[in-house]
């Protein structure tokens, strides 16, 4: 099985949709995903994800299935230092997040001062639990960091979601500590990251990222990569 974890196209947050450029990105992405042989489409319930997914649904003839748990993690908003102002947790400066190396693991990430709110831990646990339930429905049951294969699958599943949710989900799947995922990676609008459930035996599968933040569909249509989500010096 392959998961294609997709960040929606360039957003128009005010109108709960995507921008004019975002529609061009979504059209280009649809062509690419059709060629990838997508077999199933899921989407966050938010407009910017659904409207991005619509182009792929039309190109493939597949139905969009809404997965409510893949909405953006909007509750993870922090009150940061005056220098930066309020930011989403995954947008916090790396120089702050990586200040103490002992916090950069699965067990102690919430000890980073700006991430200590109990609500943050509850939200991350919700994502983990929802991910495990989603994958169990598709034949893969999480046991520790591995997945017991209940029913092997060759499906190629596209999930249209969001930057924060996408990084958080990848952290869980790939066993990468959350603060390192948040500060070390960024998902461009309309990009997709491919996770293969690598089976070296019939009993177990381990998620393996075989492509991150693929935006080659934009180059094919001569579209520039949107810098939305990068705070400084993208150029």
Image (spheres, helix red, strand yellow):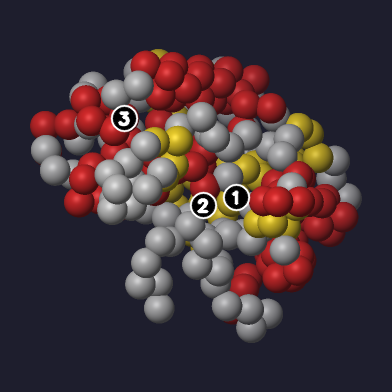
Disc 2, disc 1: CB below 8 Å? Answer: yes
Q: Residue at x 54, y 35 (%)?
A: 74
Residue farthest to the bottom, as pictured: 222
| Res 131 label | none
Whole-number angstrom distance, CA of label 2 to CA of label 1:
6 Å
Q: Position of residue 170 (x, y in %)?
A: 44, 39
The picture quadrant where one finds residue 134 is top right
Question: Which of the pair 198/14 is nearer the observer?
Answer: 14
Looking at the rendered image, the disc whose residue lies closer to the viewer, 3 or 2, is 3
Q: Helix, strand, or loop for circle 1?
A: strand
Q: Which residue is mark 1?
A: 6
Q: Helix, strand, or loop for circle 3?
A: helix
Say whether residue 53 is left or right of residue 130: right
Q: Which residue is mark 3?
A: 115
Whole-number angstrom distance, CA of label 3 to CA of label 2:
26 Å
Question: Which of the pair 202/219 is nearer the observer?
Answer: 219
Please say if 196 is above or below 212. above
Q: Residue at x 37, y 16 (%)?
A: 118
Q: Position of residue 111 (x, y in %)?
A: 21, 25
| Res 193 label | 2
Q: Residue at x 68, y 80 (%)?
A: 221
Which of pointers 2 and 1 lies earlier in the amino acid sequence? 1
Say whether residue 167 is left or right of residue 97: right
Local crowd at mark 2 within 10 Å, few (<14), some, or many (≥20)? Answer: many
Looking at the rendered image, the disc whose residue lies closer to the viewer, 3 or 1, is 3
């Amino acid at each position: 099985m392959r998961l294609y974890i997709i960040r929606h196209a360039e957003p128009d947050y005010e109108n709960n949709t995507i921008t004019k450029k975002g529609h061009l990105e979504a059209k280009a992405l649809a062509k690419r995903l059709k060629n990838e042989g997508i077999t199933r489409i899921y989407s966050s319930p938010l407009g910017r994800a659904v409207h991005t997914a619509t182009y792929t649904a039309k190109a493939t003839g597949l139905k969009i299935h809404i997965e409510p748990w893949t909405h953006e993690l909007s509750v993870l908003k922090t009150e940061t230092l005056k220098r930066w102002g309020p930011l989403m947790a995954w947008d916090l400066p790396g120089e702050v997040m990586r200040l103490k190396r002992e916090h950069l693991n699965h067990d102690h990430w919430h000890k980073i001062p700006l991430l200590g709110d109990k609500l943050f831990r509850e939200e991350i646990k919700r994502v983990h639990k929802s991910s495990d339930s989603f994958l169990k429905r598709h034949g893969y049951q999480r046991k520790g960091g591995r997945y017991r294969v209940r029913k092997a699958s060759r499906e190629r599943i596209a999930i249209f979601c969001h930057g924060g949710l996408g990084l958080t989900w990848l952290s869980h799947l790939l066993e990468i500590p959350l603060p390192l995922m948040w500060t070390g990676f960024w998902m461009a609008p309309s990009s997709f990251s491919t996770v293969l459930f690598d089976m070296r035996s019939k009993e177990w599968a381990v998620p393996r990222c075989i492509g991150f933040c693929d935006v080659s569909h934009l180059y094919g249509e001569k579209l520039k990569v949107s810098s939305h989500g990068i705070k400084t010096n993208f150029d």
